Image: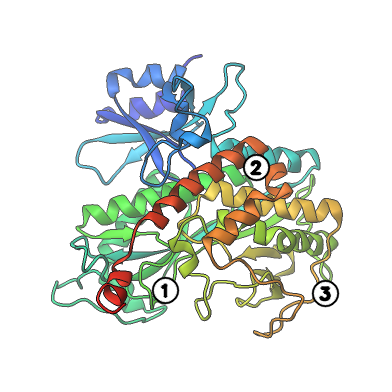
């Protein structure tokens, strides 16, 4: 292999770059890789880089998950990771001139390694391609700006105001003045997105203290949309840190404030570029109806992907704008699946279940896999949600981690959608994390019980 013309041009136009961050994305959506000196960049970009295959089967603390079968007892072999086309881009927030490149692991025969979340999503998209359909996808990511100074007794609090005199705990949803407060940060986030060709769109103040949302533009490539979400998280965290703040995509950093979600918008184009979700006036298109039915039918067993952590389920509560039922509705944000149809040719689905702490590749795989199942099996969605009046037909979603993992473990849909091997790997990672949480006694328990019982 030889270095691509895109990468060669980039290196020529950026002689200042001293180091390349080369990384893959693990099961938790965490970037993991190496720093490569510039003098090795051309070789890595042309021929790839070896990383342990077990890098894809780590728990959220970065520890090997031996039950996943990629580390202990295998010799922990390397796999070849090749650069993803046109992801070489500047890292604008570091003091040392740096670039980054996203990698994907390959088998010896050139096929995608099963444990790479990008390959999980790619497999779902190949099924759409065989039907002559193309998903057009965008994500919306919510996050909190937080003070970087914290302690065990004060682990999270809003950032200082611009004049560093006070910390606001106000909601101030859609406040323009709150955007002004952190104008320098958001301006640099926008510049970093532009430099990395991450199509950031609207920025808005959300419901929690220091909570914001960045929307990404629709693209007719779901893999690229997932890349954009992963890279946006890196940008937000990197830029805020440069400005002496921190940012968190935890689903629920504050117990009594709004959680952070990752809403997914998508439509489907046929071979002629027509939106198959666009129906007639007053009637849903059949593919839209069936896709919605598939999403609802597979939602509960996919919750371990949409809510992947112990903290995730704190968001799945009443009055948190996070769905608790497998429901759908026209233009209603109370439903898990919102049909956006105010402009007929732009009709799309908004899937509102996933938390901002989820892995974008796996979320899109589960969503698009569920929609495809609905289309192929002509699944009807049942009665729609009107206002907030959930019906008995709207099945409750699992509201705790144990239940979600049990449904995931028993799901044939998950095995078909993600692959049986990846299902087993992901389950092993999450069961190891669950065991850790079970072993740790919380400060609330000590406060309540150590003296009183």
Quadrant of the snapshot with the C terminus: bottom left
Mark linked to residue 281:
3
Crowd band around label 2 with a 10 angstrom C-alpha radius: few (<14), some (14–19), many (20+): many
Asked which secondary structure carries label 2, the reply is helix
Q: Nearer the viewer, mark 1 or mark 2?
A: 2
Asked which secondary structure carries label 1, the reply is loop
Q: Residue at x 67, y 38 (%)?
A: 420
Measuring from the top left, give residue 161's x and y in whole percent.
20, 73
Measuring from the top left, give residue 431's x and y in whole percent.
50, 48
Q: Is residue 448 above or below residue 231?
A: below
Mark found first going from the N terminus, 2 or 3: 3
Residue indicated by mark 1: 206
Q: Is residue 101 above or below residue 317?
A: above
Would residue 424 appear left or right of 80 to someone viewing this image?
right
Residue indicated by mark 2: 418
Question: Label 1, label 2: how many angstroms apart (C-alpha)?
Answer: 33 Å
Question: Label 1, label 3: how many angstroms apart (C-alpha)?
Answer: 33 Å
* Number of marks in the rendered image: 3
Closer-to-camera residue (165/355): 355
Q: Is residue 149 above or below residue 77?
A: below
Closer-to-camera residue (211/301): 301
The picture quadrant where one finds residue 445 is bottom left
Q: Residue at x 35, y 22 (%)?
A: 41
Q: Is residue 263 above or below residue 88?
A: below
């Amino acid at each position: 292999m030889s270095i691509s013309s895109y990468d060669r041009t980039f290196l020529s136009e950026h002689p200042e770059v001293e180091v390349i961050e080369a990384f893959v994305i693990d099961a938790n959506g965490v970037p993991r890789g190496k720093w490569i000196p510039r003098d090795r960049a051309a070789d890595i970009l042309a021929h790839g880089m070896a990383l342990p295959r077990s890098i894809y089967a780590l728990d959220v603390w970065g520890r090997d998950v031996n039950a996943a079968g990629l580390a202990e007892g295998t010799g922990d072999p390397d796999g070849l990771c090749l650069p993803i086309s046109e992801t070489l881009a500047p890292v604008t927030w570091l003091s040392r001139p740096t670039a980054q490149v996203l990698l994907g692991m390959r088998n010896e025969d050139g096929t995608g390694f099963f444990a790479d979340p990008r390959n999980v999503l790619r497999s779902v998209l190949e099924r759409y391609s065989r039907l002559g359909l193309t998903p057009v996808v965008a994500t919306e990511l919510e996050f909190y700006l937080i003070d970087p100074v914290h302690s065990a007794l004060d682990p999270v609090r809003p950032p200082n105001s611009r004049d560093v005199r006070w910390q606001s705990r106000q909601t101030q949803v859609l406040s323009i003045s709150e955007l002004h407060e952190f104008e320098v940060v958001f301006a640099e986030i926008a510049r970093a997105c532009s430099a990395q060709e991450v199509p950031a769109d609207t920025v808005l103040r959300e419901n929690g203290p220091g909570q914001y949302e960045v929307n990404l533009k629709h693209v007719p490539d779901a893999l690229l949309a997932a890349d954009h979400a992963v890279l946006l998280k890196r940008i937000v965290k990197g830029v805020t840190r440069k400005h002496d703040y921190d940012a968190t995509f935890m689903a629920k950093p504050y117990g009594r404030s709004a959680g952070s979600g990752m809403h997914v918008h998508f439509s489907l184009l046929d071979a002629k570029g027509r939106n198959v979700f666009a129906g007639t006036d007053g009637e849903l298109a059949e593919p839209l109806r069936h896709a919605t039915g598939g999403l609802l039918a597979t939602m509960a067993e996919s919750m371990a992907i949409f809510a992947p952590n112990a903290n995730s389920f704190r968001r799945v509560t009443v009055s948190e704008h996070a769905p608790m039922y497998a429901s759908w509705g026209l233009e209603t944000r109370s439903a898990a699946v919102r049909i956006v149809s105010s402009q007929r040719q732009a009709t799309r689905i908004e899937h509102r279940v996933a938390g901002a702490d989820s892995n974008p590749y796996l979320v899109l795989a589960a969503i698009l896999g569920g929609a495809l199942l609905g289309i192929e099996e002509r699944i009807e969605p049942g009665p729609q949600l009107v206002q907030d009046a959930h019906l008995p037909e709207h099945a409750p979603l699992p509201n705790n981690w144990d239940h979600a993992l049990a449904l995931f473990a028993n799901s044939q849909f998950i095995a078909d959608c993600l692959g049986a091997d990846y299902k087993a790997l992901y389950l092993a990672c999450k069961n190891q994390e669950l065991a850790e949480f079970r072993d740790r006694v919380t400060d609330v328990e000590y406060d309540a019980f150590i003296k009183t019982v």
